[in-house]
Amino acid sequence: MKSIPSRLRAPTLLTAGTVIVLAIGGATRGWGSVADVAPIPIAAIAALYIWGGRDSDAGALIRHELDERQAHQRLEVQALVGRVLSLAVGLAYMIAVATKANLWPWAILLGLMAVAFVAGRLIYGERGHSETDENAI
Amino acid sequence: MKNSVRDQRTEVGLTQADLAAALGVSRQTVISIENGRYLPSLPLAFRIAKLFKVPIEQLFNPDGEEARQ
């Protein structure tokens, strides 16, 4: 990935992913359905390329060239996304219970969230500020 | 937290882009620091102080208004 110019990395990844998904979709559902959805990822690739060239926070994010403020900003956005998704999964689980639908997909997601939380504590816990110092007076 | 980064920068005749390049951060980050919207990390604050050759407490005043993170 280092050999690809930073501006092209995200569009290249998205292009590769799009080609794979469209190839699978075309082979299984017919090429007509591919033509219907293809403009969306193509527009997304073009948008990533254009925004990636801008001298802005969004451009730095797309190019993966973040300084400390932008990295902090990304962390906060990711935390918000995580909170929203956690709430959505919890809500979906309750709806599945109420409607007697399949629970296992939501149970797996809830389990993954719990595992990610514990892993996060183990990996990043030492870097935090809330740990008590045993030598503290 | 108030700071005098803008004053120091203009005093030595640097643009925001020059300062950003010297510090290895984006121009947007320099703007945010100067406007008090972002509090830099300690390493970055020390880099700024070293660049302007002033004590860090001369750059950042803790008695000023709280900056938004």
Image: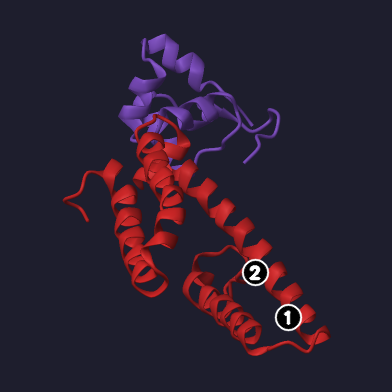
**Tag 2 secondary structure:** loop
Mark 1 or mark 2, whichever is nearer to me? 1
- Look at the image and give the colour of chain B: purple
Q: Position of residue A124 (x, y in %)?
A: 50, 69
Q: Is residue A53 above or below residue A77?
A: above
Chain A's shade in the image? red
Q: Quadrant of residue A43?
A: top left
- Residue A133 lies in what quarter of the image? bottom right
Q: Position of residue A81 (x, y in %)?
A: 61, 59
Amino acid residing under circle 1: Tyr
Identity of the residue drawn at 55% across and 64% down: A128
Query: Residue at image x 46%, y 37%?
Result: A57
State the residue at coordinates (37%, 10%).
B13
Quarter of the image where the C terminus of chain A is located: bottom right
Chain identifier of the residue bearing label 1 in the image: A
**Residue count near mark 2 (Cα–Cα under 10 Å), binned few <14, some 14–19, many ≥20:** few
Gap in angstroms between the C-alphas marked 1 and 2: 47 Å
For this orientation, the residue located farthest to the right is A98
Task: Mark yes or no: residue A27 visible.
Answer: yes
Up the image or down, A38 lies above or below A101; here it is above
Would you name the residue on which mark 2 appears? A137
Q: Amino acid at mark 2?
A: Ile
Q: Which residue is mark 1?
A: A93
